[in-house]
Amino acid sequence: MPLKRRIVMAGTTFFLAAATGHVMQNGHTIGEKLRGALSTEPAEAMAEATTPAAALPTPQPTDAVLVAGTSLPAATPKTGGLPDLPSEQAQALTSGVLLAARMDAVADSYARPATDADAEYSVFGIPCGSSKLDLSLGASGTLRATLAAPCHPDERVVFSHAGLSFAMLTDASGSVSVTIPAMLAAATVDAGFANGEVLSAERVVPDLEGLRRMALSGDGAVRLNAYEDGAAYGAEGHFSALNPGDPASAATIVVLGDAALEAPKIVEVFTAGKDAGSVTFEAEAEATPATCGRALKAHVVTMAGGRIGMRETLKQAMPDCDAVGDLVLSPLPGWEGPLSVATSQ
């Protein structure tokens, strides 16, 4: 196509140049002819204007028109005005014709296809995806639980392990991490949300052989006290949530859970080495307007060498409300012994 265009342009340019040359070479002759035509045109126009109308030839009817040397029949004018159009009567709209009726019929069977707009999104505008719970090994027979749940920001989550349960709050991104003293060598940790979603993770904890643990689980109204080598309440060797001991030492209490939640679940775990001295335990409950005159419950779980030694439910009867402010202390068995009939249910 470009080649043809160049050829046509060249030929046209050549033709115009040739014509221009002809005019330039014969300009004087063409000019004389034009001047002669202009001098005779006014006279002829005056003659036509003075000729009477009767002298003009009368056009004769003909049945043919000459078109490019061909004789064609002349068109016969149509008489009678515009053609007749079919008559139409206005029709009333029926319910089947109305758009609303048609849409109602479609809506009953219409199912909108799923799109990305149906996905749940985090506070950062990112599709949530799946929640995930990971367990990693920590020091001194502990597990580091890391929960990532983008669609559960600032939400209560309940962790469960070996019959112990505690509740925490996720942050704005739906994440939370906690270090859990393992109560089993083959450990399983669950994390559950209010909507029924539960995540589970498993991990083998290898370094529990030289450890013993006593755990108390409840709503936080019943607390754990541990006394090493006959220590008195509040003296050195007394371990509690208020005096947990040195985390780097062999004997310490760890508190799990958020007491500020509306429905708190708290776990307290005391850990000591197998070669530790004698240890005795007590359950402590304070008589308050919320606890007085009722029975409090807590779960007691012990571990020795990576195996569960005891799993019991403690029921603590509280005094009447005229004793608000008093502390109620109930002895607990050691690492292995069962609870007494008076304090268990």
Image (cartoon, rainbow, N blue to C red):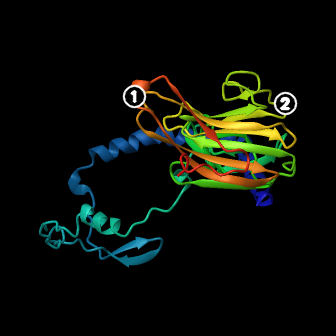
Residue type at mark 1 is Cys
Residue type at mark 2 is Ala
Q: Which residue: 13% across, 68% down?
A: 91
Of mark 1 and mark 2, the one earlier in the sequence is 2
Q: Which residue: 53% across, 41% down?
A: 36
Residue 130 visible in the picture = no
Q: Are marks 1 and 2 in contact (CB under 8 Å)?
A: no
Residue 343 visible in the picture = yes
At label 2, counting other C-alpha atoms closer than 10 Å, the crowd grade (few under 14, some 14-19, many 20 or more) is few
Image height check: is 131 above or below 272? Answer: below
Q: Which residue: 22% across, 70% down?
A: 96
Secondary structure under tag 2 reads: loop
Q: Position of residue 4 (x, y in %)?
A: 77, 60
Front in this rendered view, residue 155 or 301: 301
**Closer mark to the observer between disc 1 and disc 2:** 1
Q: Position of residue 236 (x, y in %)?
A: 76, 22
Image height check: is 253 above or below 114? Answer: above
Query: In the image, which disc is placed on residue 200?
Result: none
Residue at numbered disc 1: 321
- Left/right placement of residue 332 relative to residue 316 reads right
**Could you say which quadrant of the image residue 35 lies in?**
top right
Front in this rendered view, residue 58 or 228: 228
Query: In the image, which disc is placed on residue 248?
Result: 2
- Left/right placement of residue 117 relative to residue 189 reads left
Q: CA distance from mark 1 to mark 2?
A: 41 Å
The quadrant the N terminus occupies is bottom right
Image height check: is 87 above or below 161? Answer: below
Secondary structure under tag 1 reads: helix
